[in-house]
Image (spheres, grey):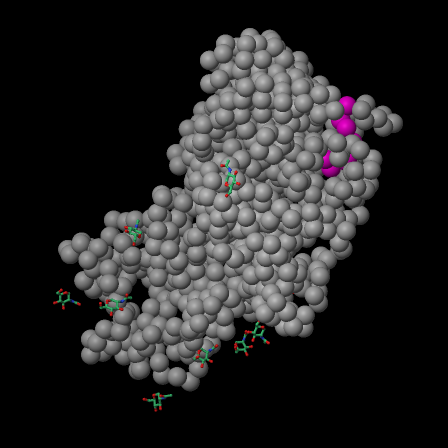
Amino acid sequence: MGFTLTSKTLTNLQIISLILLLHSLSVFPQTNTSSRIDQDQVIRDGETLVSPQQIFELGFFRLGNSNSTYVGIWYYGIPNRTVAWVANRDNPISDDSGVFRLGNGSLIVSDRNGVVYWSSNSSSSAGSNSNLTSMLMDSGNLILTTVQNAGDDSNAIWRSCDHPTDTYLPNLRVYLNISRGISREFVSWRTPDDPSRGNYSMGVDPQGSPQVVVWEDRSNRRLWRTGHWNNQIFVGVPQMRSLLLLGFRLVPVDSEVMYFIFNYPTSNPLVRFLIQWNGFVQQLTYDNQTSRWNVSLSQPSSGCEEYNKCGNFGVCRTSNSPALCSCMAGFDPNPASRDQWNSGNWSGGCVRRTQMECSSNGTTSDGFIRHTDVKLPDFADLIAVSSGDCEGRCLQNCSCDAYAYLSGVGCLIWSGSLVDVERFEQGGETLSVRVANSDLVSGSSSKGVSKTIVIAISVTAAVVLGVLALLLWRYRKACGKTKNAPLVSEMSNGQDISVEVSEQLERERKEYDGPPLPVFSSRALEAATDGFANKNKLGQGGFGPVHKGILPGGQEIAVKRLSKSSGQGLEEFKNEMIMIAKLQHRNLVRLVGYCIEGEERMLVYEYMPNKSLDSFLFDPVKKAELDWKTRFMIIEGIARGLLYLHRDSRLRIIHRDLKASNILLDEQMNPKISDFGMARIFGGNQNEANTNRVVGTYGYMSPEYAMEGLFSVKSDVYSFGVLLLEIISGHRNNSFRSDDSTNLIRHAWKLWKEGKPEELIDPLIVDSCNRTEALQCVHVAMLCVQSSAIQRPTMSSVVFMLEGENTSLPQPSELDITSLSSTEMDMIMEGREINISSNDVTITEVSGR
Ligand SMILES: *[C@@H]1O[C@H](CO)[C@@H](O)[C@H](O)[C@H]1NC(C)=O
Ligand SMILES: *[C@@H]1O[C@H](CO)[C@@H](O)[C@H](O)[C@H]1NC(C)=O
Ligand SMILES: *[C@@H]1O[C@H](CO)[C@@H](O)[C@H](O)[C@H]1NC(C)=O
Ligand SMILES: *[C@@H]1O[C@H](CO)[C@@H](O)[C@H](O)[C@H]1NC(C)=O
Ligand SMILES: *[C@@H]1O[C@H](CO)[C@@H](O)[C@H](O)[C@H]1NC(C)=O
Ligand SMILES: *[C@@H]1O[C@H](CO)[C@@H](O)[C@H](O)[C@H]1NC(C)=O
Ligand SMILES: *[C@@H]1O[C@H](CO)[C@@H](O)[C@H](O)[C@H]1NC(C)=O
Ligand SMILES: *[C@@H]1O[C@H](CO)[C@@H](O)[C@H](O)[C@H]1NC(C)=O
Ligand SMILES: *[C@@H]1O[C@H](CO)[C@@H](O)[C@H](O)[C@H]1NC(C)=O
Ligand SMILES: *[C@@H]1O[C@H](CO)[C@@H](O)[C@H](O)[C@H]1NC(C)=O
Ligand SMILES: *[C@@H]1O[C@H](CO)[C@@H](O)[C@H](O)[C@H]1NC(C)=O
Ligand SMILES: *[C@@H]1O[C@H](CO)[C@@H](O)[C@H](O)[C@H]1NC(C)=O
């Protein structure tokens, strides 16, 4: 990941950080012979290898009173030996004559008579006469490489992490060959004192979209699953926070191979995941004070976490306890087991009230009932269609029971039965279940129900936390403890992290070459919007009015009619549209199609039922629906969307008109940035950073943009800062009045200087919010609204600051805007380049002190 930079564009602070970073990188591989074993060297029973920074140790061990001797890897220096990997788990040596050596291209465990108990069988891939070495890494990985590549994980001939036992360690990649189907890499120990293969396994089921599953091997029964990966989190673990830099990732390598990884900074408390001998998935965190492993989580916990608790077509809901289960709308308890059902044994499940109507010519009167916030059923199939066609494909298929469209994943459909569905109070995805026309009226969508049963269930919800979720929370807590740890060292330890990020971004970029963008006729759009009737008008954007419409297929759309002054040629416009349509991100409004006819230019977007952020944020009544959690989610979403536009999209778009009314909200209040690319369409030559035509909205415009028409990614950062302050305070920037401040930003600076940033927080949420998080957001906002564009962070730094709680942030400073020199202006321009090409540098700039 080479980075290109011009030193001129770096502040001293950044240079110092960079030097620190490079320095720590070069110091990092301090190899000590004792962490390596070379060709024909041996380790005898009683001797050990220790990883360079003394985190893991490899050697022979025995358990309990048994004489059975194993070779394994355990944590160095932890009083009760904690074994993370075992070589000869099924084939112990029965005395103390064991020898571990590197010979003939393989790692071998044998006894004094030369009987081989275990071999890595890597000799064939090693090449017969190459000089090899093996090293125990600080990650807990034992790798076999050529001498030249000693310590290089990525060029290893053999890795212990490719052959795990029962433990997953952070930062290790577990590769999966998807075309081979299910992998069950992790197998539990038999008993706490017997590492041989036990009764339970854990692995990944790639069907549909991948998910982690636990099996009981004997019966081949599933015990627990995380729910499908939705490209950010596992759907069954809605509380899992999606972090860009840390946490779980599933990363496709090519069409066949993907790997999963848990990114976690090594400087934090030790963490491991385990499929325990009794079948529970555990996440454990080491407590330095007590020298014990805290069980942070154990799954499956009772209730709805049990696999298919409610049977086929049943829905489990923890808040309905003790009557956890109900049938989906349009379904009734299975008559064959109705008594069982009524007495609380729900495993018999539910059956359809009215059979689906099926005809070979694809016409059917069946409809769909939407279930929001659910863990999607098991056994999905992924089909390659765009979101609009997902429903149609389900109707065409006589056995299709339901569908769901996950952005970034695609169209999932289910045939047969709907198995293991859980309803969450928040999070999850939307499942559309097909029912006969006559059942459409009887059952209302679960949405209506949810409104009436919004009971505070945070306690129960906490019980349902998935493995991953808890870990992420833990991590955030852990972060707090290392308050003063400089970020630079964290980044150098977790060097892999930045690699992960760029891979993730690379993937997002590749993901969408999608289907061609539909072209609509203006007649069709006129029909869809009732001739652009006033009653359908959603709003008036800077570039033209927006109307709600319904396509003949029932899909709801928002049609934006562009004012006729863009001055762009037809072909140009079309090309722009097609490019912009390819920008797809969870936090950008999706373009459904467009229309060009004569002078008429229209853009067709997906319709967002919750309208825009300003309709909530600045409405005295609806404001209350935005609790802190929601607000924070919105903040993070906007930051990610903007980061995607700035750095990761092919077009590197500067929005130039970011404001609350351009942030739309979907039904789960996920924010979606709209009007991106508008500046591109209207702004003329984008290589000129100085434009005659200032688009944008006063109040959100950065000083250099408003005054001199200069724009860069940093102008968007400024607007983001304003938006952040509005979300936190619940006040509009430009209609804000207090005793001595005419706008919100002045007011914020005043409070900041007086050391009272908490007074900015909206009184509605000040008591219920997570104060640390909120104050962190205020701090980030102040950094973003600095007058000096250079001092503003980039969006990648912003995302990092938002996600890594308590990273030490630089102090913002309020400069006089007129002091911007022309050289400084030049630097802003070049700053654009630097932001784009180097994530490392922009991240280090955060660490200044
Ligand atoms: C290297 O290993 C030797 C013994 O094998 C040990 O005495 C020494 O402290 C180790 N050095 C470091 C830097 O860990
Ligand atoms: C372990 O080995 C010792 C010495 O060979 C023997 O006396 C003892 O019975 C063995 N213990 C077990 C549990 O096999
Ligand atoms: C290495 O392999 C050769 C033949 O494949 C075998 O004869 C020899 O015993 C092996 N050496 C060791 C140390 O295993
Ligand atoms: C290595 O190969 C031998 C013989 O084919 C086999 O018995 C053994 O299980 C293999 N070891 C591993 C770790 O796969
Ligand atoms: C293999 O590499 C080690 C360490 O560099 C060296 O000591 C040894 O002589 C080499 N062996 C051969 C056969 O080249
Ligand atoms: C994945 O598995 C398939 C089927 O076993 C095999 O043909 C393919 O070569 C494997 N791909 C990789 C990259 O290992
Ligand atoms: C594993 O399966 C065996 C055989 O069914 C059984 O005896 C044993 O109790 C099981 N162990 C656990 C931990 O469930
Ligand atoms: C472990 O648990 C104890 C008691 O529940 C708690 O006080 C401690 O902070 C925990 N340690 C870690 C590292 O989570
Ligand atoms: C754990 O405690 C030891 C001393 O008790 C200390 O040296 C070490 O730095 C601590 N590690 C962490 C990760 O806090
Ligand atoms: C070590 O493990 C044993 C048994 O698991 C337990 O009783 C003991 O308290 C542990 N000691 C420490 C220091 O954790
Ligand atoms: C629950 O009901 C199913 C049939 O619906 C039956 O097979 C099963 O034995 C019952 N389980 C218990 C514990 O009663
Ligand atoms: C499709 O088939 C059904 C009967 O299966 C028939 O009623 C209907 O008219 C057909 N529709 C078309 C468009 O052919």
Task: Tell which of 342 and 28 is nearer to you.
Answer: 342
**131 with respect to 430 (left or right):** left
The image shows residue 509 at horizontal and vertical percentages of: 45, 34
Task: Tell which of 671 and 117 is nearer to you.
Answer: 671
The residue depicted at 19 percent of the width and 58 percent of the height is 124
**385 with respect to 319 (left or right):** left
The image shows residue 252 at horizontal and vertical percentages of: 40, 45
Task: Tell which of 115 and 629 is nearer to you.
Answer: 629
Picture layout, residue 129 above or below residue 512 = below
Q: Tell me the quarter of the image containing the N terminus.
A: top left
Quadrant of residue 820 in the image?
Answer: top right
Residue 623 visible in the displayed image: yes
The residue depicted at 48 percent of the width and 48 percent of the height is 398
**815 with respect to 592 (left or right):** right
Question: What are the residue bounds of the magenta stretch?
Answer: 727-734
The image shows residue 450 at horizontal and vertical percentages of: 72, 50
Q: Tell me the quarter of the image containing the C terminus.
A: top right
Magenta stretch contains residue 731: yes
Quadrant of residue 166 in the image?
Answer: bottom left
